[in-house]
Image (spheres, rainbow, N blue to C red):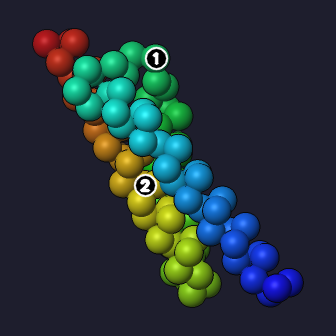
């Protein structure tokens, strides 16, 4: 059981942090509501998640690589929507 607990905690942490981006995607996708999101924060977060993916692959830790891949995809989508909204508001 003591060997299983860290895996359970790690998986739960990965799932919660990965899924935490879904509300932002749901808010930004159909309504274009990204004005309250910081472009610099989204760039930094996406970059950090991409680096976690590289780290996870280098360490052979597929939980880290996989969960951060999903997170990077979701945050990257919000970043793309933010850029879309900036572009459409300046036109």
Instruction: Give the answer, above or below, for where 46 lies relative to 66.
Output: above
- Quarter containing the N terminus: bottom right
Q: In terms of depth relative to the viewer, which is nearer, 32 or 84?
A: 32
User: Label 1, on which residue?
Assistant: 36
Find the distance from the CA under tag 1 to the CA under tag 2.
Answer: 20 Å
Q: Check contact, mark 1 vs mark 2: CB within 8 A.
A: no
In the visual, does 12 lie left or right of 53? right
Inspect this view and state whether residue 43 appears: no
Residue 24: which quarter of the image? top left
In the visual, does 91 lie left or right of 59? left
State the image coordinates of residue 45 (x, y, percent, origin top left): 52, 45
Q: On residue 5, which mark appears?
A: none
How many discs mark residues in the rendered view? Answer: 2
For the point 78% across and 76% down, the residue is 5
Q: On residue 72, which mark appears?
A: 2
User: In the current view of this chain or complex, which residue is farthest to the left?
Assistant: 91
Q: In terms of depth relative to the viewer, which is nearer, 54 or 30?
A: 30
- Quarter containing the C terminus: top left
Q: Give the secondary structure at mark 2.
A: helix
For the point 39% across and 16% down, the residue is 35
Inspect this view and state whether residue 41 appears: yes
Label 1: few (<14), some (14–19) or many (≥20) C-alpha neighbours in 10 Å: few
Label 2: few (<14), some (14–19) or many (≥20) C-alpha neighbours in 10 Å: many
State the image coordinates of residue 64 (x, y, percent, origin top left): 57, 71
């Amino acid at each position: 059981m003591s060997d299983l607990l860290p895996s359970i905690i790690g998986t739960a942490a990965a799932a919660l942090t990965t899924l935490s981006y879904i509300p932002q995607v749901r808010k930004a996708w159909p309504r274009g509501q990204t004005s309250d999101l910081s472009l610099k924060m989204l760039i930094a977060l996406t970059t950090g998640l991409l680096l976690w993916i590289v780290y996870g692959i280098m360490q052979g830790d597929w939980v880290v690589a996989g969960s951060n891949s999903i997170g990077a995809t979701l945050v990257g989508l919000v970043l793309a929507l933010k850029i879309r909204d900036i572009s459409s508001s300046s036109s």
